[in-house]
Image: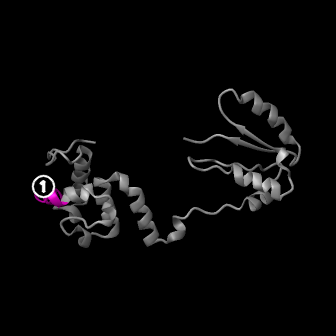
C-alpha cells in the first residue's frame, strides 16, 4: 500500500492509524470526508478516545457517534484500535443478527458417540484453551466403555512409532478409544 502523502499530525498517533484514517477518508469520502481535518483540529478529544479503555463503548469525537451507523463506527474503530475490534464486532453481530450467532454451540458427546462407527471416527480439532479430555473420560464411564480402554496419546516429536503401533488396534470395532492430542497453532 502506498504511504499517505499527508503527514500524521501527532506523535502519539501511530503511523498505521493515520494511514488507515487517510485510506478510510479516501475510500468512503461521502461519510468520512472531514475525518482528517477533524483529527487535526481536535487533538485532545481524539487522543482521549484513542486512550480510552473501551473506545467501542465511548462517545466518538466530532459527533461521529451520532452521524455514523454501527458498521461505519466499526470501520473508524478499526483504524484507531485494532485491539478492540474483536469485541466490537461481537457486539455488532449480537445486535444485528442475535446472540445465537456469537455463542459457541454446546457439544453433546453422547450424541457424537452415537453417530460414530468404526468407519467414521470422531475427530476433534482443538484450539488454544479447549481440551475435551475430561468430557471424553466421562463419556467412557457413562457408556460402560471403561476408562482402561481409553488411550490418551500426545502427538509430537518422537511419538510416531507409539501412535503407529496403537493405530493397529483401531481395526477392532469399538474396542479401544484413542484420543490423539495435537493443538493447531
Residue 143 figure quarter? bottom right
Residue 36 falls within the magenta-colored stretch: yes
Q: Please, what is the dominant secondary structure of the magenta stretch?
A: helix
Q: Is residue 116 visible?
A: no
Residue 157 falls within the magenta-colored stretch: no
Residue 125 placement (x, y as % from top left)? 63, 47
Relative vertical location of residue 18 with respect to residue 52 in this rendering, above or below: above
Residue 26 figure quarter? bottom left
Of the 4 image quadrants, the one containing the N terminus is top left
Secondary element under disc 1, as helix, strand or loop, is helix
Residue 91 placement (x, y as % from top left)? 42, 66
Instruction: Count numbered badges in the picture.
Output: 1
Q: Is residue 67 visible?
A: yes
Chain part drawn in magenta: 35-45
Whether residue 5 sits left or right of residue 59 in the image: it is left
Tell me which residue sits at (31%, 70%) in the image.
69
Tell me which residue sits at (57%, 61%) in the image.
104
Tell me which residue sits at (80%, 53%) in the image.
140
Residue 171 placement (x, y as % from top left)? 86, 41
Q: Which residue is mark 1?
A: 40
Amino acid at each position: 500500500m502506498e504511504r499517505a502523502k499527508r503527514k500524521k499530525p501527532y506523535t502519539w498517533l501511530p503511523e498505521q492509524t493515520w494511514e488507515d484514517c487517510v485510506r478510510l477518508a479516501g475510500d468512503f469520502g461521502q461519510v468520512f470526508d472531514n475525518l482528517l481535518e477533524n483529527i487535526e483540529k481536535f487533538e485532545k478529544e481524539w487522543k482521549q478516545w484513542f486512550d480510552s479503555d473501551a473506545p467501542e463503548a465511548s462517545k466518538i469525537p466530532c459527533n461521529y457517534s451520532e452521524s455514523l451507523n454501527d458498521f461505519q463506527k466499526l470501520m473508524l474503530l478499526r483504524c484507531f484500535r485494532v485491539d478492540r475490534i474483536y469485541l466490537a464486532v461481537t457486539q455488532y453481530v449480537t445486535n444485528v443478527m442475535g446472540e445465537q450467532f456469537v455463542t459457541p454451540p454446546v457439544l453433546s458427546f453422547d450424541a457424537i458417540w452415537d453417530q460414530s462407527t468404526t468407519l467414521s471416527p470422531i475427530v476433534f480439532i482443538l484450539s488454544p484453551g479447549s481440551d475435551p479430555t475430561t468430557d471424553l473420560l466421562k463419556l467412557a464411564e457413562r457408556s460402560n466403555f471403561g476408562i482402561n480402554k481409553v488411550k490418551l496419546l500426545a502427538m509430537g516429536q518422537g511419538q510416531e512409532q507409539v501412535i503407529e503401533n496403537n493405530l493397529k488396534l483401531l481395526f477392532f470395532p469399538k474396542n479401544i478409544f484413542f484420543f490423539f492430542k495435537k493443538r493447531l497453532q
